[in-house]
Image (cartoon, helix red, strand yellow):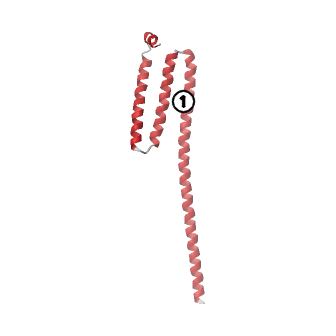
Amino acid sequence: MLLTILNDDLLMMLRLLMLMLMLMMLMLMMLMMLMLMLMLMMLMLMMLMLMMLMLMLMMLMLMMLMLMMLMLMLMMLMLMMLMLMMLMLMLMMLMLMMLRLMMLRLMMLMLMLMMLMLLMFMLMMLMINDDDLLADAI
């Protein structure tokens, strides 16, 4: 009699233990899923930001095209190039945020510096809008 009772109790205990373990596992799985979801959300956000940037730049380009009909062709080309450079720089910034590897980061920084120099050069070219110079360039 006593043995059976003990056995029953033990079985109950075991069952409870198993249940607990199962619950724990479930919790863990839920947590994992949550983490995954969060990571995906972050990625989506990044993508969204990129899209927004692209859209804004497209608008700028359109405006530039409108201006193109009014202004000099060469100047407009310069401005277009400037816009493209800006876009590249922004993209690189984003990449920098995402990148973990140090070497790649350094390379990106170098590229960005080169881009900035080019930008400065182009701005300078735009500043010197002497008619003679433009005529020579054409």
Q: Which residue is drawn at 53% across and 34% down?
A: 53
In this orientation, which residue lies closer to the viewer: 109 or 128?
109
User: Which residue is located at x 57 percent, y 32 percent?
Assistant: 55
Note whether 84 is above or below 128 in the view shown: below
Number of on-image labels: 1
Q: In this view, does 107 lie above or below 123?
A: below
Q: In which quarter of the image is residue 97?
A: top left
Q: What element carries label 1?
A: helix
Three-letter residue code for mark 1: Leu
> How crowded is the residue under tag 1: few (<14 C-alpha within 10 Å), some, or many (20+)?
some
From this view, report whether residue 21 is shown above or below residue 84.
below
The location of residue 138, given as percent across then percent down, is 47, 13
Write the residue at 49% across / 35% down.
91
- Mark 1 sits on what residue? 57
Q: Position of residue 60 (x, y in %)?
A: 55, 26
Q: Which residue is drawn at 39% across and 43% down?
A: 102
Q: In the image, is 24 to the left or to the right of 112?
A: right
Q: Where is residue 137 in the image (x, y as percent from the top left)?
A: 45, 14
- Give the position of the N terminus as an image quadrant: bottom right
In the image, residue 29 lies at what x, y percent?
56, 60
Looking at the image, the residue that sits furthest to the bottom is 1
